[in-house]
């Protein structure tokens, strides 16, 4: 069921007036964009803050944006404000030119932190599913301009369609191009039109790419040479539920309520059993967990792997192990609002230091459908999802 959500100061009908001063007063992270230089040849409008304001102004006058529902407008508006949020930490001078390498990838991480950890507590929480799409839009906002340079254009558009809407990516790229003073604006807009048409031809402009099955999707993203139209034979023989979430998110509670009776390989439980502190070397704990997993895998028995698993590489290593035994992979990502999560942690008998939770949160990669047969997102900030 859809839920309505409005980003603070997102312009509303009928006049869609942009309150720029209100935004600056509400969000101090916008101020970090001031005085961050850009290459004058491609951004003659000035610093990153000036560019961001022009992008926002272009967005709110765009008829395509105005036709979106309230939540869609808020998601894309937030992404427009955040799309260059990492430029201040990425900007450097190379061969006499100002460049910002990897600002989209790092910007997605920064946007995640702003919308989850650093969100003003007096503002309505950003719903998880809205935040997930905003982060994806920040990550892929430059894709339409660089699609022709990708070695596999088809895969380049299918992957983001699993996370957000490619037509929203195109919309953000369009206003990004319009919100600058540059000599190649016409060419940029033509590239965006080509991106739209390419996505439309591959059935992923306004929807996730329609794979024949969850197993076909899973195999496609595991195998770089796989054809997305190939219907993969499903030879899985057991299901592994891989838990993911920050300490205190509620993973144990979710397992008790939804997978009662399933064998659980729990790193926390093993640490207690083996008398090893979370601050000590975890090698023995992980090795014991993998031994237990292999016993279940050899028997073809369903089980749960319960640990934080907050980064993609953490999960990938385990998924490869499970996949080698022909397991069906289900990731269950559990999340609690940041203030609630920190409060829960303090109430635990052995609480995790706050700086450690922040460390994990800063590196959080929310699981997505390119990783597994099934991904469940369980967030207590979203009583309803959309």
Image: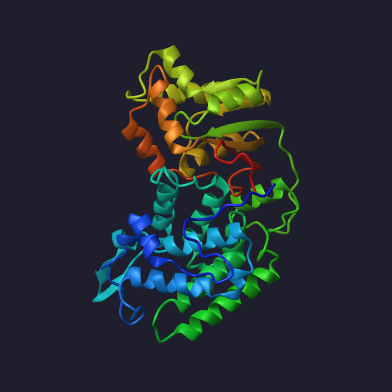
Q: Please state if 238 lies on the left or on the right of 357 as rendered.
A: right
The colour scheme of the drawn protein is rainbow
Which quadrant holds residue 261?
top right
Residue ranking furthest to the front: 14
Q: Is residue 149 in view?
A: no
- Residue drawn at 63 percent across, 65 percent down: 68
Across and down, in percent, residue 368 comes to 57, 47
Above-or-below relation of 85 to 2: below
Residue situated in front as seen by the camera: 37 or 383: 383
* Image location (x, y in percent) of residue 134: 51, 56
Count up the numbered dots. 0
Q: Residue at x 40, y 16 (%)?
A: 349
Q: Is residue 85 above or below residue 173?
A: above
* Residue drawn at point x = 40 percent, y = 87 percent: 183
Front residue of 13/181: it is 13
Q: Percent x, y for residue 260?
A: 65, 20
Residue 316 percent location from the top left of the image: 52, 41
Q: Is residue 248 above or below residue 177?
A: above
**In the picture, residue 346 is in which quadrant?**
top left
Residue 17 appears in the picture as rendered: yes
Displayed quadrant of residue 67:
bottom right
- The front one of 15 and 121 is 15
Residue 25 higher or lower than 327, as above or below: below
Residue drawn at 54 percent across, 45 percent down: 128
């Amino acid at each position: 069921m859809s839920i309505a959500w409005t980003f603070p100061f997102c312009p509303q009908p009928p006049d869609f007036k942009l309150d720029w001063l209100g935004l600056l007063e509400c969000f101090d992270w916008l101020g970090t964009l001031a005085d961050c230089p850009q290459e004058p040849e491609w951004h003659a409008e000035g610093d990153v803050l000036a560019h961001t304001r022009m992008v926002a102004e272009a967005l709110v006058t765009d008829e395509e944006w105005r036709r979106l529902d309230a939540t869609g407008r808020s998601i894309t508006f937030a992404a427009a404000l955040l799309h260059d949020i990492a430029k201040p930490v990425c900007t450097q001078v190379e061969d006499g030119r100002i460049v910002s390498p990897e600002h989209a990838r790092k910007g997605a991480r920064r946007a995640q932190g702003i919308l989850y950890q650093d969100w003003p507590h007096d503002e309505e929480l950003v719903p998880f599913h809205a935040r997930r799409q905003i982060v994806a839009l920040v990550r892929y906002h430059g894709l339409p301009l660089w699609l022709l340079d990708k070695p596999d254009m088809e895969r380049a558009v299918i992957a983001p369609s699993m996370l957000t809407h490619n037509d929203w990516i195109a919309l953000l790229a369009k206003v990004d191009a319009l919100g600058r003073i540059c000599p190649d604006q016409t060419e940029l807009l033509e590239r965006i039109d080509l991106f739209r048409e390419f996505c439309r031809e591959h059935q992923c402009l306004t929807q996730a790419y329609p794979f024949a099955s969850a197993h076909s999707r899973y195999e496609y993203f595991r195998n770089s040479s796989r054809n997305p139209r190939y219907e993969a034979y499903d030879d899985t023989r057991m299901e592994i539920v891989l838990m993911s979430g920050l300490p205190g998110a509620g993973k144990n509670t979710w397992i008790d309520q939804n997978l009662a009776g399933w064998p659980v390989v729990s790193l926390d439980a093993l640490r207690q059993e083996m008398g090893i502190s979370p601050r000590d070397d975890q090698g023995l704990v992980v090795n014991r967990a993998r031994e237990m997993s292999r016993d279940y895998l050899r028997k073809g028995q369903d089980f749960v792997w319960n640990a934080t698993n907050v980064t993609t590489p953490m999960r990938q290593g385990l998924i490869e192990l499970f996949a080698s035994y022909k397991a069906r992979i289900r990731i269950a990502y559990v999340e609690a609002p940041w203030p609630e999560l920190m409060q829960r942690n303090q109430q635990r008998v052995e609480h995790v230091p706050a700086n450690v939770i922040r460390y994990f949160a800063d590196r959080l990669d929310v699981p997505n459908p390119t990783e597994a047969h099934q991904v469940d997102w369980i967030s207590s900030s979203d009583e309803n999802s959309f």
